[in-house]
């Protein structure tokens, strides 16, 4: 059964592909390294040559939606793909399951950031013994801070959702019983 986790593994394979020159170059230009972080690449073709059952599951997950775009054969269905030709970052729930994606579509006139839904935390829920929590305005800012390796053992960083503090973030903060300080990064 298709899941956001199994689909993300295919995106991770995609970023490692020899053909993924543009995504790798873009990551380098923003100072991120896919070998240090969980980052994938969605070429937009993951649903090609899949069964109708798989495509239906992808629709249920919200990663494809039927489109009225023209197709070369009337027996085919056109789809709009979430995060097409974009870098994909996974958002996790409390059980460390992928429940959402953040996509950075870098190959447009102006890069576009989008979320699949409103669930999950990037990069993950902080350890319960976290003493200092950093709140980054975006997934990219959060990834940059994580990759810098400046966080100490009892420090954690999470990304806000489009700069917004959601109920899920507040629940996390309330659950951190050892928390001594919160640092909020502004853009």
Image: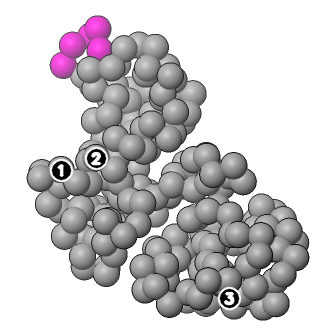
Task: Give the residues drawn in magenta, as a range.
Answer: 72-76
- The residues bearing labels 2 and 3 have C-alpha atoms spaced at a distance of 33 Å
In reply to whether residue 73 is colored magenta, the answer given is yes
Residue 109 seen anywhere in this rendered image of the structure: yes
The residue singled out by tag 2 in the image is 13
Looking at the rendered structure, the secondary structure element under dot 1 is loop
Residue 84 seen anywhere in this rendered image of the structure: no
Looking at the rendered structure, the secondary structure element under dot 2 is helix
- The residues bearing labels 1 and 2 have C-alpha atoms spaced at a distance of 6 Å
| Left or right: 59 as drawn, with respect to 107 | right
The residue singled out by tag 1 in the image is 17
Q: Badge 3: how crowded within 10 Å, few (<14), some, or many (20+)?
A: few
* Rendered view: 82 above or below 27: above
Q: Badge 1: how crowded within 10 Å, few (<14), some, or many (20+)?
A: few
Q: Which residue is painted at 24% across and 62% down in the image?
A: 23
Contact between marks 1 and 2 (CB within 8 A): the answer is yes
Q: Position of residue 42 (x, y in %)?
A: 33, 47
* Rendered view: 85 above or below 175: above
């Amino acid at each position: 059964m298709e899941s956001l986790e199994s689909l993300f593994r295919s995106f991770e394979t995609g970023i490692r592909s020899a053909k993924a020159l543009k995504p790798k170059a873009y990551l380098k230009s923003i100072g991120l390294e896919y070998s240090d972080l969980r980052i994938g690449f969605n070429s937009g073709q993951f649903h090609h040559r899949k069964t109708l059952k798989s495509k239906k599951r992808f629709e249920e997950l919200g990663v494809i939606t039927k489109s009225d775009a023209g197709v070369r054969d009337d027996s085919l269905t056109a789809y709009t793909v979430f995060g097409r030709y974009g870098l994909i970052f996974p958002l996790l729930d409390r059980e460390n399951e992928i429940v959402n994606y953040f996509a950075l579509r870098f190959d447009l006139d102006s890069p576009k950031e989008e979320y699949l839904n409103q669930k999950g935390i990037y990069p993950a829920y902080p350890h319960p013994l976290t003493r200092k929590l950093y709140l980054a305005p975006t997934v990219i800012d959060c990834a940059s801070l994580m990759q810098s390796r400046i966080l100490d053992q009892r420090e954690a960083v999470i990304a806000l959702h489009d700069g917004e503090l959601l109920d899920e973030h507040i629940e996390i903060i309330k659950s951190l019983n050892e928390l001594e300080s919160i640092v909020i990064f502004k853009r």
